[in-house]
Image (cartoon, helix red, strand yellow):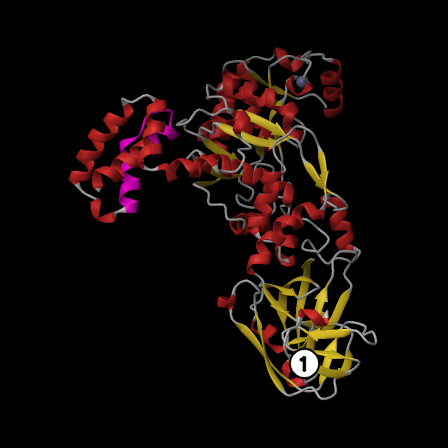
């Protein structure tokens, strides 16, 4: 048995990693399947068997799995389409990826994509994933967003191997900056801002470029005492470069603002490109997938890594997508919140993660959706429906069902017997339990009733023209099934649903809906999914999820 287990996992591991199994991984797999196997005997046997397997040709290994454990191969075949295939990463390559947000705003679904594709890429290759706050512009960083982002990303199910803050590396940035100045690869530029912008545009060098390292170092040290914009450290590159970001770009500038984490300790801050390239280098980030707006910066960032002797990070830029009709511009959202056109950053019309969460979108649906959008370079506009399809797949399986009536239309059915009705909380999963109603002759319904039409109150009985017909479900009656509530205050609860257009639908629902926990999503049968937002004494408040 033990030999078989080792053999099976050695084969699988070998096939996964280009024909070479790793003894440690194989031992780990065996122990997770058979914990009692742990010990020196396992280690010795694993060593021998892995050696034997590694001496086989890859094709032979595949055939052997087919013989001894075909289920291990099938699993691989049914795996979903690999959106990372184009990266052509060889099995066994050590992968480290990162997602580096600036703690400056509420993350939206576009950020979720950049986060999740990097996280997934690392996970699929047993690699590392680093979450890094790029917080070296004290004017942009806001304290609250560190926490909001961590909460949002954890909610999405992301588990980072390392969390770091670029602002913890200030001394390192200074040291590397000084090295460049001393090697005459960077200089202090004291030109006026407008003049310099012009020079960079025209491809003309400024006189500061002629200063030597000694003078540049002096100015660099003086910078904390100088006014903002009066001195900038620039890389000495090529003022005629066709990529304008390569024309002597800034690597340090003076920013006199209080930093959310560091207060007023620093007044000279690294540029985005300098910081980003160094942080990727220090952490040994092998791959990074990011959206296309950074494309121009790629050349500069790779150049900085090369100058400083870091291993280059492979960067791939994918196109952003937009959700049709959804506002994503922070400035406009802020204005609309101020004008009370939006409830806040979690307004149900927005695609921020806080908004999606509050409406009842699930982390799994968001992940499935963003991965399904792929990594193409062509911009695309998607609709809410593209996202909803994934969420409905999750909710259909999980959400409890309840009746709600919104028309306040009371009907009386003559001769209806007193009954106790049982309705499943989920049509396909009786294990979730039942709701129980006691009924008499009066009901609330939402439908308009037509004469001579047979109706069936779902799970209850058939009636026609206001009179009871029969209990049993009988297809020959061609009864139209309708939803209902017993017209009995004790069995009902008032509910309100906030719609994406901020209108509020009021209605009555069965009392068992009170058993929902806040944040739980339910389906109001034949209407839509809703997420319980708040429980009040006399009513429950829901947010509309989708149909
Ligand atoms: Zn200058």
Residue at far front of view: 476
Q: What stretch of residues is rendered in magenta? A: 12-33
What residue is at 55 percent from the left and 60 percent from the top? 398
What residue is at 74 percent from the left and 50 percent from the top? 334
Residue 40 in the image: state x and y as whole percent: 16, 39
Residue at far right of view: 451
Residue 479 visible to the viewer = no
Question: How would you classify the magenta stretch by its main secondary structure?
Answer: helix
Residue 166 in the image: state x and y as whole percent: 51, 36
Q: In this view, does 345 lie above or below 120?
A: below
Q: Is residue 310 above or below residue 114?
A: above
Badge 1 density bin: few <14, some 14–19, many ≥20, Cα 10 Å: some
What residue is at 70 percent from the left and 64 percent from the top? 526
Residue 524 in the image: state x and y as whole percent: 66, 66
Q: Is mark 1 on a helix, strand or loop?
A: strand
What residue is at 39 percent from the left and 27 percent from the top? 92
Numbered marks: total = 1
* Residue topped by disc 1: 470
User: Which image quadrant is residue 415 in?
Assistant: bottom right
Q: Nearer the viewer, residue 26 or 442?
A: 442
Residue 382 visible to the viewer = yes
Ligand number 1: quarter of image: top right
Q: Work out which quarter of the rendered image holds the N terminus and state it.
A: top left
Q: Is residue 154 above or below residue 138?
A: below
């Amino acid at each position: 048995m033990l030999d078989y287990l080792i053999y099976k996992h050695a084969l699988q591991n070998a096939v996964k990693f280009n024909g070479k199994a790793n003894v440690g991984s194989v031992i780990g797999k065996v122990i997770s399947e058979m914990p009692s196997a742990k010990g020196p005997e396992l280690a010795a046997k694993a060593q021998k068997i892995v050696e034997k397997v590694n001496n086989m040709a890859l094709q032979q290994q595949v055939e052997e799995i087919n013989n001894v454990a075909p289920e291990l191969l099938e699993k691989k075949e049914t795996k979903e389409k690999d959106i990372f295939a184009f990266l052509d990463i060889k099995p066994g390559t050590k992968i480290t990826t990162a997602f580096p947000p600036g703690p400056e705003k509420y993350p939206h679904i576009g950020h979720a994509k950049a986060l999740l594709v990097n996280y997934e890429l690392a996970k699929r290759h047993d690699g590392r994933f680093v979450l890094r706050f790029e917080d070296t512009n004290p004017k942009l960083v806001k304290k609250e967003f560190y926490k909001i982002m961590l909460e949002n990303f954890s909610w999405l199910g992301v588990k980072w191997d390392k969390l770091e803050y670029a602002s913890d590396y200030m001394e390192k940035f200074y040291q590397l900056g000084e090295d460049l100045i001393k090697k005459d690869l960077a200089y202090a530029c004291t030109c006026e801002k407008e003049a310099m912008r012009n020079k960079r545009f025209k491809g003309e060098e400024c006189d500061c470029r002629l200063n030597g390292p000694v003078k540049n170092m002096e100015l660099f040290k003086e910078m904390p005492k100088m006014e903002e914009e009066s001195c900038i450290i620039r890389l000495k590159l090529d003022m005629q470069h066709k990529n304008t970001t390569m024309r002597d770009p800034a690597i340090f500038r003076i920013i006199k603002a209080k930093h959310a984490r560091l207060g007023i300790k620093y007044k000279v801050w690294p540029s985005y490109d300098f910081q980003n390239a160094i942080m990727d280098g220090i952490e040994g980030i092998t791959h990074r997938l990011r959206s296309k707006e950074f494309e121009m910066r790629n050349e500069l960032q790779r150049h900085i890594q090369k100058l400083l002797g870091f291993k280059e990070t492979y960067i791939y830029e994918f196109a952003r997508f937009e959700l049709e009709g959804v506002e994503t511009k922070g400035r406009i959202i802020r204005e609309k919140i101020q004008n009370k056109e939006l409830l806040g950053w979690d307004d149900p019309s927005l695609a921020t993660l806080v908004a999606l969460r509050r409406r009842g979108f699930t982390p799994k649906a968001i992940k499935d959706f963003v991965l399904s959008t792929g990594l193409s370079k062509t911009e695309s506009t998607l609709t809410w429906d593209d996202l909803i399809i994934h969420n409905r797949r999750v909710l259909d399986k999980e959400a409890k069902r309840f009746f709600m009536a919104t028309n306040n239309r009371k009907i009386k059915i003559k001769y209806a017997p007193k009954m106790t009705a049982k309705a499943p909380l989920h049509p396909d999963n009786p294990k979730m339990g039942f709701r129980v109603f006691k009924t008499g002759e009066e009901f609330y319904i939402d439908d308009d009733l037509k004469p001579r039409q047979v109706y069936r109150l779902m799970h209850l009985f058939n009636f026609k023209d206001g009179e009871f017909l029969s209990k049993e479900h009988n297809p020959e009656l061609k009864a139209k099934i309708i939803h209902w509530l017993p017209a009995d205050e004790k069995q009902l609860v008032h509910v309100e649903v906030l719609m994406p257009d901020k209108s509020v639908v009021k209605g009555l629902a069965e009392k068992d809906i009170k058993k929902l926990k806040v944040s739980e999503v339910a389906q109001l049968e034949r209407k839509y999914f809703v997420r319980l937002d708040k429980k009040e004494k006399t009513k429950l408040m829901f947010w509309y999820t989708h149909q």
